[in-house]
Image (tube, rainbow, N blue to C red):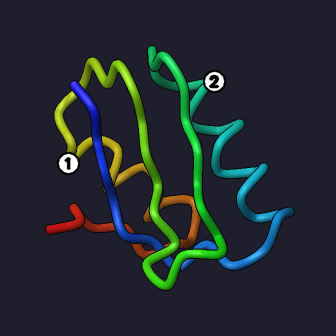
Amino acid sequence: MIGIFKTNVATYRERNLVIKAICNNFDVGSCHIDIEDCDKVLRIVDLKVEEHHIIDFVKQQGFHCEVLE
């Protein structure tokens, strides 16, 4: 499954921290945050957990996260 989320991750440093945290805590194929996009889109390929687990985790890291509709 592919997960697409809207975030408020704004800097390259924040992006790297969130991606590293996700990859270290979840079994994912790849993970990317487009900080140039207005929705700061987090895209996770081969997501093997329910989306709410990712949302809760990113929020625990101090960032907004919701499913991108």
Q: Give the residue pinned by disc 2.
A: 24
The residue at 31%/51% (across/down) is 4
Residue 9: x, y in percent? 61, 72
Helix, strand, or loop for circle 1? helix
Q: Is residue 51 left or right of residue 38?
A: left
Q: Is residue 45 above or below residue 60?
A: above
Label for residue 52? 1
Q: Is residue 58 above or below residue 9?
A: above
Q: Which of the 4 quarters of the picture holds residue 45?
A: top left
Whichever of callouts 1 and 2 sits on the residue coming sooner in the sequence is: 2
Q: Is residue 66 left or right of residue 11?
A: left
Number of numbered discs visible in the structure rendering? 2
Helix, strand, or loop for circle 2? helix
Q: Which of the 4 quarters of the picture holds residue 1?
A: top left
Amino acid at circle 1: His
For this rendering, which residue is in front, 8 or 43?
43
